[in-house]
Image (tube, grey):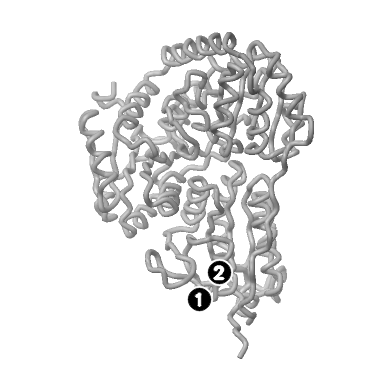
């Protein structure tokens, strides 16, 4: 007797064979055949565990958090139509931040696509909705298309700049019977540098008197080598928000993720040679129209389109950062950059002092809280941040010693990602401490996912910074003499809200109680919402 199962179940089994262990989503009438292959949260009935979210946007953000924490594809499974459009924000964020996410969705019956019959969840061409937000958006018109589309998706994740993929499977295709013999393909490796280019880069860097290394998230696998390269050259290191911690932020040569600071922007103009590794040199890291780059620019990136975009390279190297930095570190062995390094350490020390002296009143409160948080959280803690002023300050003021520990959506900058990101990260790495950092405005975008964290008994400290609404936009309006419009909405009682969701709720009265609350929350049997008001006396 032939071993036949539905295409929907076969799809889930194929995901498991590609190494997927968790999917996030909300089942619907159009995803029932997928559910045949799924287990419930915490109960391994199937090959892949399903985590029930409260909104498909939360599902996408949880998949994003899984990917941020591990570097492996996070997967969201959603219904057709509104499920896809709800999850699309997370797709945009994963596209902007080069994260491997798979959005697997249902679609209306293949016979109805594009015909306007008014069927349930109808979108005339669903793949067109997500095409601008993905590396691949495709519809399986028959069951036999699914293994090929999965092969394309996981090849993108493995061999290219990782970006999200959306695969739609219509309900009639999900129901097709297939043999349970779908297996993963052999995945491509990432490119290595072309012969001679690393030697050229080494020669330029050796001759530099004021070298700078700018690192992004694409350099995450080369932390040790980049640290060694910086030390041999005496190069100042500046990270993007995604590259934060690759070279430890407290290293004497590191300025952390500080391109947003005018002090650092002015210094970049003084560099005579810049090595940019795995970074777009994005406007979303500096928030100015263009960095003043005057020195020779060496760009090393897996994406060839980065070589001659807004910042054309003097030397372009298309390669994965891991093997390329091993080769460059070898090429620089024996180079004596001691004199340059001493000067660079003095520069870094002076710039850190200048940044500290120029902090605004709000930034000083942020820095005070973040310093206390660093002292009470374990060294391997992951901080899942939303788009809020506390996190903006933390990008340069919160020192971290390793990559994948600071989540900050600087590129797409969607609100509401912090809590679901943290849930995804905690489920991916259950032994790692995870802390949420959110503003009061952004937290309300996905507050319903607090129920998911509560149901799963996740020990998450959820720090909500209360500053009266959308404070960054308030400040921007004030600075331009624009009357405040739509930025001062009322907040709920966050402590009562936490308790209503089955969580602890605390409002610390001083730094010591804040630290003890965080420490207790990391050991608790459920999440703890920690509400902190800007301008409370203990922060000023």
In the rendered view, does 281 fall on the left or right side of 258?
Answer: right
Q: Contact, CB < 8 Å: mark 2 with mark 1?
A: yes
In the picture, the quarter occupied by the C terminus is: top left
Closer-to-camera residue (211/163): 211
Q: Which mark is residue 449?
A: none
Q: Residue at x 29, y 55 (%)?
A: 501
**Residue 351 spot, x, y in % from top left:** 49, 13
Q: Where 67 sits versus 198, above or below?
A: below
Residue 219 place in picture, x, y as percent:
60, 36
- Tell which circle, 2 or 1, labels the residue nearer the N-terminal end: 2
State the residue in front, 419 or 204: 204
The label shown at residue 36 is 1
- Alpha-carbon neighbours of circle 2 within 10 Å: few (<14), some, or many (≥20)? many
Dot 2: element: helix
Q: Nearer the viewer, residue 405 or 319?
A: 319
Q: Which residue corresponds to the image point at 54% horizontal and 36% vertical from the top-left?
A: 242
Q: Is residue 62 left or right of residue 373?
A: right
The residue that disc 2 covers is: 12
- Vertical placement of residue 396 versus 341, above or below: below
Farthest right residue? 195
Q: How dense is the environment of label 1, judged by Cα within 10 Å: few (below 14), some, or many (20 and up)? A: some
Q: Position of residue 259 (x, y in %)?
A: 56, 23
Task: Measure the C-alpha gap from mark 2 to mark 1.
Answer: 9 Å
Quarter in which the N terminus is drawn: bottom right
- Residue 218 location (% of width, % of height): 61, 38
Reply above or below: 69 against 25. above
**Snapshot quadrant of residue 179:** bottom right
In this view, the residue farthest toward the front is: 334
Image quadrant assignment for residue 266? top right
Residue at image location 33% in from the left, 35% down from the top: 466
Q: Name the secondary structure under disc 1.
A: loop
């Amino acid at each position: 007797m032939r071993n036949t199962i539905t295409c929907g179940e076969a799809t889930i089994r194929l995901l498991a064979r590609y190494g997927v262990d968790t999917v996030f989503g909300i089942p619907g009438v159009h995803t029932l055949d997928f559910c045949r292959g799924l287990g419930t949260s915490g109960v391994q009935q199937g090959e892949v565990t399903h985590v029930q979210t409260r909104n498909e946007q939360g599902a996408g953000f949880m998949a994003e958090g899984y990917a941020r924490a591990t570097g492996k594809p996070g997967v969201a499974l959603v219904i057709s139509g509104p499920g896809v459009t709800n999850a699309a924000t997370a797709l945009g964020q994963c596209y902007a931040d080069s994260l491997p996410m798979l959005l697997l969705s249902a679609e209306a019956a293949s016979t109805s696509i594009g015909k306007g019959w008014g069927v349930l969840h109808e979108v005339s061409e669903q793949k067109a909705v997500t095409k601008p937000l993905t590396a691949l958006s495709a519809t399986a018109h028959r069951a036999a298309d699914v293994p090929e589309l999965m092969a394309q998706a996981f090849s993108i994740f493995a061999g290219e700049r990782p970006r999200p993929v959306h695969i739609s499977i219509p309900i009639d295709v999900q129901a097709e019977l297939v043999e349970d013999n779908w297996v993963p393909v052999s995945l491509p490796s990432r490119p290595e540098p072309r012969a001679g280019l690393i030697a050229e880069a080494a020669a330029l860097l050796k001759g530099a008197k004021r070298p700078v290394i700018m690192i992004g998230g694409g350099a995450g696998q080369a932390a040790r080598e980049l640290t060694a390269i910086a030390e041999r050259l005496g190069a100042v290191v500046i990270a993007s928000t995604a590259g934060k911690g690759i070279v430890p932020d407290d290293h004497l040569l590191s300025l952390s993720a500080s391109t947003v600071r005018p002090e650092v922007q002015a210094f970049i103009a003084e560099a005579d040679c810049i090595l940019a590794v795995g970074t777009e040199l994005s406007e979303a890291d500096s928030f100015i129209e263009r960095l003043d780059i005057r020195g020779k620019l060496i760009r090393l990136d897996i994406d060839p389109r980065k070589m001659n975009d807004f910042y054309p390279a003097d030397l372009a190297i298309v390669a994965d950062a891991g093997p390329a930095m091993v080769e460059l570190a070898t090429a620089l062995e024996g180079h004596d950059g001691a004199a340059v390094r001493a000067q660079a350490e003095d520069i870094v020390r002076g710039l850190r002092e200048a940044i500290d002296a120029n902090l605004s009143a709000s930034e000083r409160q942020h820095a005070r809280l973040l310093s206390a948080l660093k002292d009470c959280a374990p060294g391997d803690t992951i901080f899942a941040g939303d788009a809020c002023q506390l996190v903006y300050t933390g990008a340069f003021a919160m020192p971290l010693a390793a990559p994948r520990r600071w989540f900050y959506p600087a590129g797409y900058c969607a609100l509401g990602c912090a809590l679901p990101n943290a849930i995804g990260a905690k489920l991916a790495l259950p032994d790692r401490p995870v802390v949420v950092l959110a503003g009061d405005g952004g937290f309300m975008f996905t507050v319903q996912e607090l129920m998911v964290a509560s149901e799963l008994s996740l020990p998450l400290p959820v720090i909500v910074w209360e500053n009266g609404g959308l404070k960054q936009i308030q400040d921007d309006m004030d600075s331009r003499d624009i009357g405040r419009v739509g930025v001062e909405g009322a907040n709920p009682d966050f402590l009562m809200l936490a308790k209503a969701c089955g969580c602890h709720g605390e409002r610390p009265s001083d730094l010591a109680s804040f630290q003890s609350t965080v420490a207790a929350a990391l050991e608790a049997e459920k999440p703890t919402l920690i509400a902190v008001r800007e301008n409370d006396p203990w922060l000023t």
